[in-house]
Structure formats: structure tokens, C-alpha cells
Amino acid sequence: MDKANYKKTCKIARQLIDELLVSQIRRDIAEADGDPKRLWRTTKQLLHPQMPTSMNDSDCATMASNFCSLFYDKVERIKTSVKSASLGQLFPTSSFQVSRCQALAL
């Protein structure tokens, strides 16, 4: 029963968030009505949101660490699936070693 309540609550929350976003977009477009330059700028911002152009050292280290963990986990899953599919004889995985990622020194 808890899972059903959780899913129902998630659905309601998603609907509320979507409604909020739609109303924000409508308001932004309505405010730009009659001003083609502002409408174009608003449309560009909605379709192509700006990503940060620079990141601090902490953000870079976090992103690199996350990527490294993702890569390591993916390689390990592939190795496990090859072994479990009895393809180890065709594709030996014991010689391919990936070490855990080390913390980055900044």
C-alpha cells in the first residue's frame, strides 16, 4: 500500500511541477508580447538554456570523480556479464584490470 501511495504522490508532484513550468513559460511569453526582440530572447532562453561556462575546482573534481565511478562500474558490469554468460573462454577478462579511481589532487 505504501508503494501505491508513493507512486500516487509522485504523480501529483510531477503534475504540479509541470503546471508550474507551463504557467511560468506562458507568463514569460505574455510579458514579451509586442516586443519581438524580447520575445526572441525569451524563446531562445526556453529552448536553449545556458549551461555554466566555467566551473570551480570543487565542481570539476566532483564531475571527474562521478565520471570515473560511472566508467569503473560500467566496466565491472560488462566483465561480470561476460563471465556469467560463459564467454570467459572466448573473451578472457582476467587480464583487463581497471583500478578504482583515486581522489583528484587540486
Image (spheres, rainbow, N blue to C red):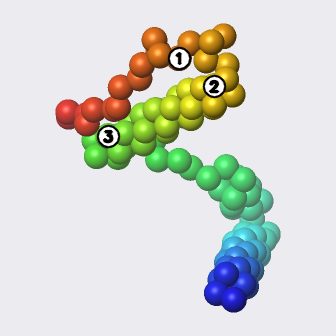
- Give the label on residue 82, or none: 2
N-terminal label among 2 and 3: 3
Q: Residue flagged by tag 1: what amino acid is it?
A: Thr
Residue 54 in view, yes or no: no
Please give the residue where the numbered disc 3 appears in the rendered image.
61
Mark 1, residues whose alpha carbon is within 10 Å: few (<14), some, or many (≥20)? some
Task: Give whichever of 3, 81 is nearer the camera.
Answer: 81
Mark 3, residues whose alpha carbon is within 10 Å: few (<14), some, or many (≥20)? some
* Image position, residue 78 (x, y; %): 59, 29
Label 2 vs label 1: CA separation?
8 Å
Residue at (53, 17) in percent of width and height: 93
12 relative to 99 in the view: left or right: right
Circles 2 and 1, Cβ within 8 Å, touching? The answer is yes
Q: Name the front one of labels 3 and 1.
A: 1
Which SS class for mark 2?
helix
- Give the label on residue 70, or none: none
Which SS class for mark 3?
helix
Task: Give whichever of 83, 65 is nearer the camera.
Answer: 83
Q: Residue flagged by tag 2: what amino acid is it?
A: Val
- Give the label on residue 93, or none: 1
Give the answer, above or below, for where 45 lies relative to 92: below
Most extreme residue toward the left is 105
* Image position, residue 76 (x, y; %): 51, 32
